[in-house]
Image (tube, helix red, strand yellow):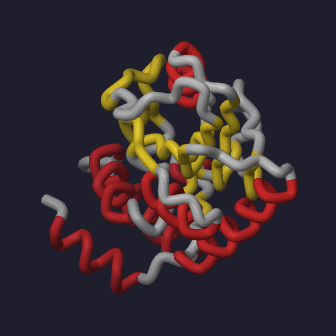
């Protein structure tokens, strides 16, 4: 039911400010990672920003797929992109936009640990209270569905698929997105591109 959907829609500025605060937390804990590893795809942009903020150009990514649709996930994450560089004897800052079930983070953390990493810390912008993994660093806890600025079109596509043939429910969901901060004009523009 749409009435149960809550959306959190951070702006680019919100995200950047949260990442500044997270970089400060990493420095306060005196954690100096050798490599920043972004979990694909949500961790790519935060990893790049943190690379700048922490003045550490050593970044790479690793992939795990989980989400199918809005409030829908597979049971277990699947590794889609292995780590491309050696983690042996390195301090790793593992970065993602959100830790939801925690299973993706657990999978990736265990893979990096098996490679002989010296220390692994997990940083996420958002943390879901039901996650089986609590990040070492996070900015905000929420139960709402987070719509990041880099995935608005993807969210609209998934909402449209979820309520195919149920126009009223789809319109209610897009109305909630507008109330949460996504511009109506942007939604209309992106919907023209979605078949």
- Is 191 left, or right, of 108 in this rendering? left
Q: Which residue sits furthest top?
A: 114
Percent of width and height locating residue 67: 42, 36
Residue 52 lies in what quarter of the image?
A: bottom right
Depth check, front residue: 78 or 129: 78
- Is 111 left, or right, of 84 in this rendering? right
Percent of width and height locating residue 21: 76, 67
Seen at 47% across and 18% down, the residue is 75
Q: Quadrant of the C terminus?
A: bottom left
- Is 185 left, or right, of 16 in this rendering? left
Q: Which residue sits furthest right?
A: 28
Seen at 34% across and 80% down, the residue is 186
Depth check, front residue: 87 or 166: 87
Seen at 77% across and 40% down, the residue is 136
- Is 12 left, or right, of 8 in this rendering? left
Q: Is residue 96 visible?
A: yes
Q: In the displayed structure, would residue 130 be above or below residue 50?
A: above
- Number of callouts: 0
Depth check, front residue: 80 or 120: 120
Q: In the displayed structure, would residue 98 be above or below residue 63?
A: below
Percent of width and height locating residue 109: 58, 25
Residue 122 lies in what quarter of the image?
A: top right
Depth check, front residue: 80 or 143: 80
Percent of width and height locating residue 41: 39, 47
Q: In the displayed structure, would residue 71 be above or below residue 150?
A: above
Seen at 48% across and 71% down, the residue is 175
């Amino acid at each position: 039911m749409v009435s149960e959907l809550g959306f959190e829609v951070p702006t680019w500025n919100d995200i950047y400010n949260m990442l500044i605060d997270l970089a400060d937390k990493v420095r306060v804990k005196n954690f100096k990672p050798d490599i920043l590893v972004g979990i694909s795809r949500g961790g790519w942009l935060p990893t790049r920003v943190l690379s700048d903020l922490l003045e550490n150009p050593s970044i790479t990514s690793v992939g795990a797929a989980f989400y199918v649709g809005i409030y829908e996930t597979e049971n277990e994450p699947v590794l889609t992109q292995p780590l491309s560089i050696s983690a042996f004897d390195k301090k790793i800052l593992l970065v993602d936009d959100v830790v939801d079930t925690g299973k993706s983070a657990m999978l990736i953390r265990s893979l990096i640990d098996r490679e002989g990493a010296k220390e692994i810390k997990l940083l996420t912008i958002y943390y879901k209270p039901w996650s089986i993994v609590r990040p070492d660093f996070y900015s905000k806890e929420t139960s709402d569905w987070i719509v990041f600025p880099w995935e608005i079109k993807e969210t609209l596509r998934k909402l449209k698929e979820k309520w195919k043939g149920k126009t009223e429910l789809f319109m209610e969901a897009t109305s909630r997105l507008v109330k949460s901060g996504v511009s109506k004009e942007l939604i209309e523009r992106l919907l023209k591109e979605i078949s």
